[in-house]
Amino acid sequence: MRYRMIAIDLDETLLNSDLQISPRNKAAIREAVRRGVKVTIATGRMFCTSIPYVRDLELNVDWPLIIYHGAMITTTESRRVIYHRPIENSLATAIVREAEARGYHVNIYFDERLFIREENESSRFYNRIAPIEPEVVGPLGPFLERQGASPTKITIIIRSQEELDKAEAFFTTAYGDRVAVLQTRPSFLEITDRRATKGQALRRLAEREGIRRDEIIAFGDSCNDLDMLTYAGLGVAVANAMPAVRRAADLVTAANDADGVAEVIEKYVLL
């Protein structure tokens, strides 16, 4: 099988524990691109916190980037938005009001900006992972109502796993018919429009390029990667992936700290 497209999650998959792309992973991806393979990053991050890693790969191509868990597809250099599926304003406002009433820290994202109620330990924790200066606007429910904006993503940060599980169950029961509610890494509950997933975004890109599912490799570690791995002809979980992701994958490769992405590209694309 000749693979023509590769989709790669960033955090805990391509990035190692130091939030860097290893030299071996870089070399494998660059060689795949040189041979004509379409490589896209598929991440929950914003454009501004994703693009430094794309630039680090030095691919020198204006290729679509899947961001916000699939809620947006935008090109890397020209920044042309190919697809955008935000959360409708009144629905987002209801979710944010409920989260704030429960005392949770909430991030909301629109116009490539991050808005928070206040700076606190949760906001500083997030900034260490995805460095971006947030805009402090006070209570977010009233702010969303005033703005009339439809956010691309909502992130709820809860440091207790027990409370995070409770929040996931609540928001899934209350809003799961209209939004996707996923734990993406410890402490993060991320919410997007139900139709905005990495798998659906990957399908859009593949159809746009005339690439079949069985010509795609996808890499991931978290539940937000599941439908992308299922869609691809070869769905690959890194060894450090969540158990459900490892079970669903066609193949389990080495961990993110052991060049798992390169291991598969070298074997299935470059040989």
Image (cartoon, grey):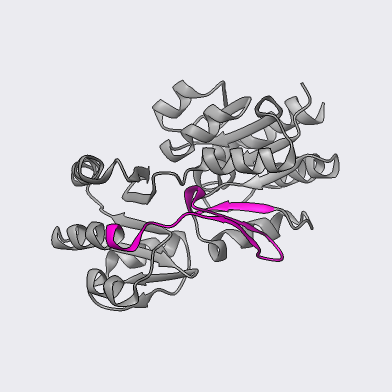
**Magenta part of the chain:** 64-91
Q: Where does the image place residue 193, in percent across and percent down from the top left?
A: 39, 50
Which residue shows up at 32% across the image and 45% down it? Answer: 178
Q: Check if residue 68 falls in the magenta segment.
A: yes
Q: Considering only vertical position in the picture, is 7 above or below 251?
A: below
Which residue shows up at 69% across the image and 43% down it? Answer: 208
Which residue shows up at 18% across the image and 42% down it? Answer: 166
Q: Where does the image place residue 201, in percent across and percent down from the top left?
A: 56, 44
Q: How many labels does the image show?
A: 0
Which residue shows up at 77% across the image and 54% down it? Answer: 59
| The N terminus lies in quadrant | top right
Residue 81 lies in quadrant: bottom right
Q: Where does the image place residue 180, in percent across and percent down from the top left?
A: 36, 44
Q: Considering only vertical position in the picture, is 215 above or below 36?
A: above
Residue 187, visible in the rendered structure? yes
Given residues 23 and 238, the one toward you in this image is 238
Q: Considering only vertical position in the picture, is 43 above or below 32?
A: below
